[in-house]
Image: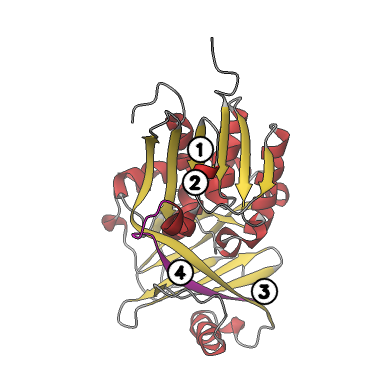
Amino acid sequence: MENPRSGEVIVVGSGVIGLTTAVVLAESGRQVRVWAREAAERTTSAVAGALWWPYRIEPKALAREWALESLSVYEELAVRPEETGVRMVEGVQGESRLDELGPWAARVPGLRASTAEEYAGTGLWARLPLVDMPVHLGWLRERFVKAGGTIEARTVTDLAEAEAPVVVNCTGLGARELVPDPTVRPVRGQLVIVENPGIRTWLVSTDADAGTTTYVFPQPDRLVLGGTTEDDVWSLTPDPAVAAEIVERCAALRPEIAGARVLDHRVGLRPVRDTVRLEREVLPDGRVLVHNYGHGGAGVTVAWGCARKAAGLTRPTASA
């Protein structure tokens, strides 16, 4: 006789990885609870610039598969941008060349070499998903609840607290202490939010000599300026000097940004790991623990692909 609780799943974590995984599980008919230390709007995901692009994430081959699977979902969601927070927006990925990318790039909409008018250096023009994360996280939460899921505010100090037949660990940086997994580390990112002076395209520019990546992401009601990549820095307090430097770098690329009114300063800690941990573990008592963390700054890019893989690993017949 089947255990009546065998379909129960607890997803620990309410960022974009946790909520997307919970949606996939709930919509497959599972009974799912999300344990959230904080509301989704207060997670690292809420701070993300959230442009789809498979960068700085390993293993590369799998990450590109997950990214393309997610791209297909985002293209569908972009039909309802006000509801889902997803829009398809054109822009330039600087310091990139077509011949440096693999076969996966053929699937990217509008991908071509940028012109001199579009970007002063070598770059790629593309039409990519750009996600308004506060809107998207709220939409994911609503979709999850509509599928029968529940969200519980709970701070977890040990994954053993989650007494369900299946537990999915989507705790991001929290996995460092919870697993514990000391290979997960923070990479600090600081953003400046300003009024949009009329910019409609996104831009990412990398200065290898200076070690900086500068980006401009237009959202419906604001302009997101970045950024920083500070390894092993835990501070969530915005640095005014860093903020001024971010605005200066962005204005050098798009002069109309100079003088734009600053609306907010934000800091997020990317949960970086040498490789994403997406695997199944059978505990001594027979319960299943699926890990889905370590996506760094590419969580949005691979969210749906990873969620579907993680959901598959929760099935009794899944291979370890």
Say if the magenta span includes residue 182.
yes
Q: Secondary structure at mark 2?
A: helix
Badge 3 vs badge 4, beta-carbon distance below 8 Å? no
- The residue nearer to you, when weighing 57 against 262, is 57
Location of mark 1 (residue): 167
- Compared with 186, 180 (above or below) is above
- The answer, for residue 69, to whether it is visible in the render is no
The residue identified by callout 3 is 196
Q: Report helix, strand or loop for mark 4.
A: strand
* Quarter residue 267 falls in: bottom right
Which residue in the protein does label 2 denote? 159
CB under 8 Å between callouts 2 and 1?
Answer: yes
Q: Inspect the magenta stretch and tell me whether residue 173 lies in it.
A: no
Q: Amino acid at mark 4?
A: Val
| Residue pictured at 55% horizontal, 18% vertical | 3
Q: Earlier in the sequence, mark 3 or mark 2?
A: 2
Q: Residues within 10 Å of mark 1 (few under 14, many from 20)?
A: many
Q: Position of residue 299 (x, y in %)?
A: 48, 53
The numbered mark, 3 or 4, whose residue comes first in the sequence reads: 3
For disc 4, the marked residue is: 204
